[in-house]
Amino acid sequence: MLNLLKQSRLSAGEISNHFSISGAAISRHLSVLKDADLIRNEREGKFIYYELNTTVLEEILLWINELKGEKNYDQTK
């Protein structure tokens, strides 16, 4: 799901087209990702669109690079 959302924001229905699991399972996975703050959602009319929370992912990259000892990590990469 994260790889799909890396490309563009999608509705739950659009996401489910890529998997052979139930809509309830898709919803549960999206809920877990949202609770982990890895994705965000936005309602537009009757649809909810999901997208990556790039802020959190950038923070994770910074943290990993600090662990590796790379203090001057370029955030624009």
Image (spheres, helix red, strand yellow):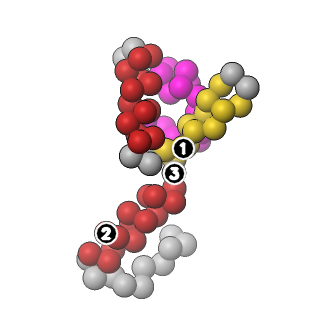
Helix, strand or loop under label 2: helix
Measured from the top left, where is residue 29 in percent x and y?
Answer: 38, 30
Q: Which residue is disc 3 drawn over?
A: 53
Q: Nearer the viewer, residue 35 or 60?
A: 35
Residue 22 within the segment the image draws in magenta: no
What segment is highlighted magenta in the picture? 1-17
Q: Nearer the viewer, residue 64 or 37?
A: 37
Kind of residue at disc 3? Asn
Mark drawn on residue 65: none
Q: Earlier in the sequence, mark 2 or mark 3?
A: 3
Residue 2 visible, this orientation: no
User: Most prominent secondary structure in the magenta stretch?
Assistant: helix
Kind of residue at disc 1? Arg
Q: Earlier in the sequence, mark 3 or mark 1?
A: 1
Q: Which residue is disc 2 drawn over?
A: 64
Which residue occupies the extreme front position in the image?
A: 35
Q: Earlier in the sequence, mark 1 or mark 2?
A: 1
Q: Which residue is disc 1 drawn over?
A: 40
